[in-house]
Amino acid sequence: MPELPEVNTFQKYFEGTSLDQRIEAVEVHDAKIIRNLSGSEFIDRLTGRTFVGSYRRGKYLFAKLDNAEHLLLHFGMTGDLNYYAEPQERTKHERFVFHFDNGQHLGFDCPRKFARIQYIEDLAVYLSEIQLGEDALVITEADFVQRATGKTATIKGFLLNQSQVAGVGNLYADEICYQTGIHPGSRVNKLSSQQQSEIYHAMQRILRKAIERSAYYKDYPENWFWEWRKEGAPGPEGKGIVQRTKIAGRTTYFIEGVQVLY
């Protein structure tokens, strides 16, 4: 599933292509990923509207409409946006498409149909209902440490808990733990406030660097753990051995002999 940097890339693409254009028509090919409206209701709600902005929190992207309501674009594992001019540019798995009055089109492609599209009348109410935590790039260090204090969960479980902090997923959580030298199975309440602060700063640094690289994995720094996730292999610079286990229900990689379990 796309994590914060990937969704940030989607946001830039959306804002760079689809703002301030009236939606002349909406075409729904497959309404399965539209969760709270039928296909016909979706068409009725969006036709004639204009996207005027966007808001991202964690892995959630909200397209703001000219009536102050929002469209949630949650990409799942395979969701993608495709802005195009000619019919032959339409993607194979396009589920719906907005036809703008400038002749351009914004299609939503999703081969495996794991995306979630919802029409949101009141964004504040929706965010409260799903108990989504503050964005990982917006949360302050003080708030992060306060949320971590006393938690008995593993540090990886805490980072993955979207009600605590929104945007970090499996791969970035492993990277944060590696870069701080902390075993992902360490209990949060066993970490010092200094270690919790180090995790916060690593989270911010890693996510911002990923955004700078447009979440294009091949451009990530060579010394990131990202490139070394092969069980039984030596870690970066030949230090330690890469291990694989399950933590917080997720496949987890760490380097034995380098990352300390607390």
Image (cartoon, rainbow, N blue to C red):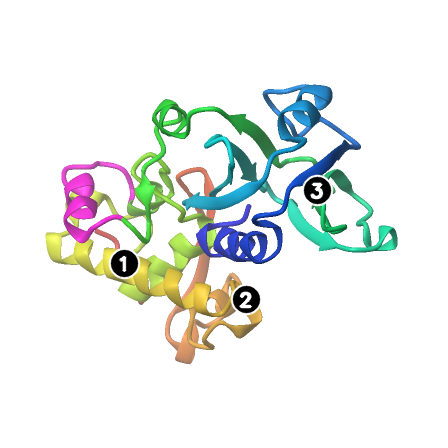
Residue 2 visible in this rendered orientation of the protein: yes
Give the number of the mark in front: 2 or 3: 3
- Amino acid type for the residue under numbered disc 1: Ile
Q: Which residues are magenta?
A: 139-154
- Left or right of 254 in this view: 69: right
In the picture of the structure, the residue carrying the numbered disc 2 is: 217
Q: Residue at x 75, y 55 (%)?
A: 84
In the picture of the structure, the residue carrying the numbered disc 1 is: 182
Q: Quadrant of residue 48?
A: top right
- Left or right of 191 in this view: 31: right
Q: Residues within 10 Å of mark 2 (few under 14, many from 20)?
A: few
Q: CA distance from mark 2 to mark 3?
A: 21 Å
Q: CA distance from mark 2 to mark 1?
A: 23 Å
- Amino acid type for the residue under numbered disc 3: Cys
Indicate yes or no whether the magenta region holds residue 200: no
Q: Residue at x 61, y 50 (%)?
A: 18
- Amino acid type for the residue under numbered disc 2: Tyr
Residue 2's tag is none
Q: Earlier in the sequence, mark 2 or mark 3?
A: 3
Residue 257 visible in this rendered orientation of the protein: no
Q: Residues within 10 Å of mark 1 (few under 14, many from 20)?
A: many
Q: Residue at x 86, y 50 (%)?
A: 87
63 versus 170 height, above or below:
above
32 versus 192 height, above or below:
above
Residue 110's tag is 3
Q: Earlier in the sequence, mark 3 or mark 1?
A: 3
